[in-house]
Image (cartoon, helix red, strand yellow):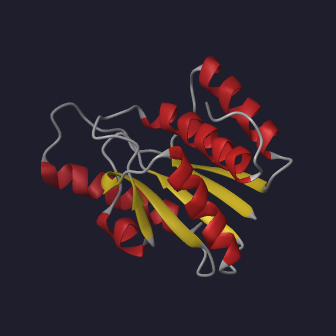
Amino acid sequence: MRITVIGVGKIKERYLRDGIAEYAKRLGRYCKLDIVEVADEKTPEHASEGVERLIKAKEGERIAKHLRDDAYVIALAIDGKQSTSEQFARQINDLGLHGMSHIQFVIGGSIGLDDAILKRADYHLSFSKMTFPHQLMRMVLLEQIYRAYKINAGEPYHK
């Protein structure tokens, strides 16, 4: 299985870069992992809805360049479906069983994802109704993908 994580913005904090690198290393025995960073736009304080739409559209264009027609796209979205780690593991496993060899996860910037990207996505996934920093979500997502592979392999980890 090939997993691609497409995220808006660079990871600035060292502890997050280290955590992402650790989970990327661990995932190496289960899948081919690619992490793609696209440039983020500066969002002015108290930006209007129109300005935010323009920012999301620019970021969305950058994301769209990396989306593949043959991939199953999962967008992280606060209004997406929530699942347990076991359900998430089953979803990844089922995609593979149904011939899907490439999953792309998309994490938007600080103001979310453009509507065009959300429409392109095959599935909307929410980790919580809470808002998290998009940089942190990259590490959390990789941890959950790793946990899913451990669960699917019947290996201890998920407790």
Answer with left or right where residue 131 lies relative to residue 135.
left
Q: Is residue 102 above or below residue 48?
A: below
Q: Residue at x 37, y 51 (%)?
A: 82
Q: Quadrant of the C terminus?
A: top right
The N terminus lies in quadrant: bottom right
Above or below, 82 against 143 in this view is: below
Q: Position of residue 52 (x, y in %)?
A: 23, 50
Front one among 149 and 132: 149
140 relative to 15 in the view: left or right = left
Left or right: where does residue 53 sit relative to residue 7? left
Question: How many discs mark residues in the rendered view?
Answer: 0
Of residue 29 and residue 119, the one placed in the foreground of this image is: 29
- Whether residue 87 is situated above or below residue 24 in the rendered picture: below
Q: Residue at x 35, y 55 (%)?
A: 113
Quick check: can you spot residue 10? no
Residue 148's spot in the image, x, y percent?
Answer: 64, 48
Residue 131's quadrant in the figure? Answer: top left
Name the residue: 86% across, 48% down. 29
Camera sees residue 99: yes
Comparing 108 with 33, the one in front is 33
From the top left corner, tell me how far across and down residue 58 is, in percent: 39, 58
Q: Relative to 35, say whether 137 is above or below.
A: above
